[in-house]
Image (spheres, helix red, strand yellow):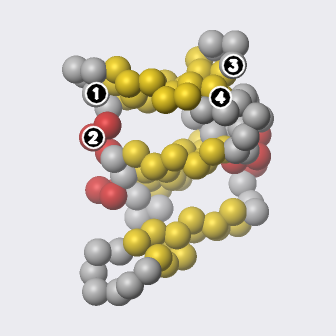
Amino acid sequence: KFSIYIKHNWGSFGYHFSYGGSCSAIMDGIQRFSYGNKGFALISMNHSQISRIEVNNGVHISSMAINSELPFALVFPNDCGSIVLYDKYNNEIQITCTEDCV
C-alpha cells in the first residue's frame, strides 16, 4: 500500500492526502502520477531494477543514479523534458502506467 501527499500553495499548512491504495504498477513496474501544472511523480518498488534515469531537456542530458535494489519515488517538473529509465543491464524500461490525479 502507498499514500501520496501534496503541499498546496493556498493558505493551508502542511501536506494533504492526494492518492493512495495498492497498485500493481508500483509493485511490478513504474507508475507515473501526474499532478497537472505541479509536475509528476514516478513511484516503483523497483522490481525492474532501475539503476539510472536520464532527463533530456533538449539542451542538456542529465543522468541520475538509482539503487537498483531499493524502491524509489521521484518528483519532476512538467517542463523537465523527456525521461528514459534504464535497468542495471542498461536496457531501456518503459513506465508501466500513468494516472492523472488533478
Is the residue 46 above or below the residue 23 in the image?
above
- Residue of label 1: 57
Q: CA distance from mark 4 to mark 3?
A: 6 Å
Residue 46 appears in which quarter of the rendering? top right
Secondary structure state at the residue bearing disc 4: strand
Q: Are marks 4 and 3 in contact (CB under 8 Å)?
A: no
Residue 18: percent from left, percent from top: 52, 71
Give the residue type at disc 4. Answer: Ile
Give the residue type at disc 1. Answer: Asn
Residue at x-position 35% and y-position 74%:
8
Residue 53: percent from left, percent from top: 51, 28
- Residue of label 4: 50
Residue 48: percent from left, percent from top: 73, 30
Tell me, yes or no, if residue 98 can be seen here.
no
Secondary structure state at the residue bearing disc 2: helix
Q: Which mark is residue 88?
A: 3
Give the residue type at disc 2. Answer: Asp
Mark 4 nearby-residue class (10 Å; few <14, some 14–19, many ≥20): many
Q: Are marks 2 and 1 in contact (CB under 8 Å)?
A: yes
Mark 2 nearby-residue class (10 Å; few <14, some 14–19, many ≥20): few
Dot 2 or dot 1: first in sequence order is 1
**Quadrant in the picture for the C terminus:** bottom left
Residue 22: percent from left, percent from top: 74, 60
Secondary structure state at the residue bearing disc 3: loop
- Please name which of the two marks, 1 or 3, marks the residue nearer to the observer: 3
- Residue of label 2: 79
**Quadrant in the picture for the N terminus:** bottom right
Residue 30 appears in which quarter of the rendering? top right
Tell me, yes or no, if residue 33 can be seen here.
yes
